[in-house]
Amino acid sequence: MNHRPSHESSRHFPQPRRLWDDATRHAPSLGCPTCLERDRCGGVHTDAGVLDCRDLCSCQDKTKCDMVCRFNPRAFVARMREVGGLGFETAPRAAANGVPALPAIVPFVDHRYGRAATLDEPAVAISLYELVNLATGKPHVASRAELAARFLTLEGATIVVSGVDKDGPIERWWELKDRPAILERFRFTRTRILSWRGSCCTCPG
């Protein structure tokens, strides 16, 4: 019989969707009203029949739980001190970059093959992994002219760089050293948005 490691949960939820928190459909868990953090977290509202969030941890040896868990007080206090608590008032603020003006539809350009003429679009999206050699980290292009020639697009087109792809290219990208310096080399492209899975950032022109 196989035994789970002491830091892994011994409890199994066969229907993970029952753990989805939805205050509009489920009543708050019975253990939440007396919790000191209720005002900040809002409580647990699931269909899983848990008393409170502590029911989600059922490690065999709770002192070895590697999550931010009250059952491991020393680690829990250290993590809370690290972030200054669960409130948003201690979270650092970043300056808003705003959202650049883009057409309603931006075509995604994989390559130039199959086209004889330049793509006459004011904005185009290009894969980050077509701009960078993922083996060396060196860019495939060094100027706006080279970029336009490589993808047969307008030299003055607004560029949206997409980091969304299958796991293989993404993992190879994260394995590269000094990624900020690699991205800095593409400042000449005047990229307006660099998008990732589930998020995007506005780049300086």
Image: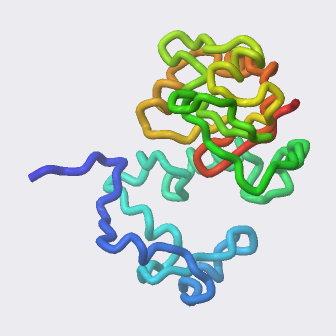
- Extreme-left residue of the structure: 1
Q: Residue at x 56, y 45 (%)?
A: 75
Q: Is residue 195 above or below residue 43?
A: above
Horizontal and vertical percent position of residue 165: 50, 40
Applied colour scheme = rainbow
Q: Position of residue 201 (x, y in %)?
A: 75, 41
Please tell me whether residue 53 is drawn above or below residue 66 in the rendered image: below
Q: Is residue 84 left or right of residue 46?
A: right
Image side of residue 55 versus residue 11, left or right: right
Task: Depth check: give the residue in front, 72 or 154.
Answer: 154
For the C terminus, which image quadrant?
Answer: top right
Task: Tell me the residue at 30%/66% (across/down).
Answer: 12
Q: Residue at x 72, y 11 (%)?
A: 142
Q: Is residue 118 above or below residue 108?
A: above
Place of residue 200 in the rendered image (x, y in percent of width and height, measured from the top left): 71, 45
- Quadrant housing residue 179: top right
Outermost residue, front side: 116
Along the line of sight, the residue nearer the viewer: 124 or 79: 124
Nearer to us in this view, 99 or 58: 99
The spot of residue 202 in percent (x, y) is 80, 40
Q: How many numbered marks, from 0 up?
A: 0
73 lies left or right of 96: left
| Residue 129 location, quadrant | top right
Residue located 70% across and 30% down the image:
153
